[in-house]
Image (tube, grey):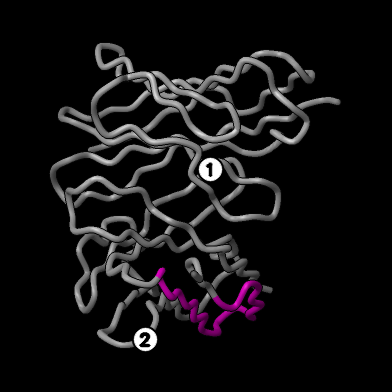
Amino acid sequence: AQSVSQHNHHVILSEAASLELGCNYSYGGTVNLFWYVQYPGQHLQLLLKYFSGDPLVKGIKGFEAEFIKSKFSFNLRKPSVQWSDTAEYFCAVMGTSGTYKYIFGTGTRLKVLA
Amino acid sequence: NAGVMQNPRHLVRRRGQEARLRCSPMKGHSHVYWYRQLPEEGLKFMVYLQKENIIDESGMPKERFSAEFPKEGPSILRIQQVVRGDSAAYFCASSPVPRGQKAEAFFGQGTRLTVV
């Protein structure tokens, strides 16, 4: 069965600090990987996605993620966070066999201090 | 271009009543997913539907919960005889392509169910 682990549940950073949020997944085959962001009171929005090709993926708002197949990881990074990045971040995986559902991690709440 | 539409946004039900949550996918999307979100628990997969078909309901509680996605009209998540533990945010997502192809899910604003 697919599963996703996000080890950092709460992260507090000052503006301009660098961000890295961990995501590890469990799945035996090829996967599609996603990071979503949920701003307070809003719905989930896609930050970036990986299907194949270059394992370093660029997303919106200066975010990027790197797929490391050997580590089953898809960590999210941003060199310099802003107060407006305060939100909850979800990593998700979709296996490429079976029923193709999206499985989400428990999320990481990021608070950026101005 | 309307996104995924969920209604109502907020729903209050007394214990024992029925809750009906509606989801209209994005235009052209024929795949719908329902998720439940509880604080500190992330998004829990409930059910994956295609028009007139349940593809995967492995995350649905065995009793009181059902879902449908008819040929015409929105997808409905139905919770019978609600209990306090059903209080949560329920999110619907839709996807545009057949199973196995590369696409992200697009999410609605969610329905916050409160059982009193």
Judge by depth and name the residue closer to the eye, B59 or B30. B30
Upstream in sequence: badge 2 or badge 1: 1
Amino acid on which the number 2 mark rests in the picture:
Gly
Q: Nearer the viewer, residue B52 or B40?
A: B52
x then y, percent, for residue A62: 58, 27
Q: What residue lies at 52% left-to-right and 43% top-to-bottom?
A: B42
Q: Residues within 10 Å of mark 1 (few under 14, many from 20)?
A: few
In percent of the image, x 58 and y 32: which residue is there?
A108
Mark 2 residue crowding within 10 angstroms, few (<14) / some (14–19) / many (20+): few
Q: Is residue A4 left or right of residue A12?
A: left
Per the rendered image, the range of residues in magenta is B7-26
- What residue is rendered at 19% in x and 73% in y? B53
Is residue A56 placed above or below B74 in the rendered structure? above
**Which amino acid does the dot numbered 1 rest on?**
Glu
Secondary structure found at label 1: loop
Relative height, residue B40 to residue B47 (above, below): above
Find residue A87 and report its image quarter. Answer: top right
Asked if marks 2 and 1 touch (Cβ < 8 Å), the reply is no
B84 vs A112, left or right, is left
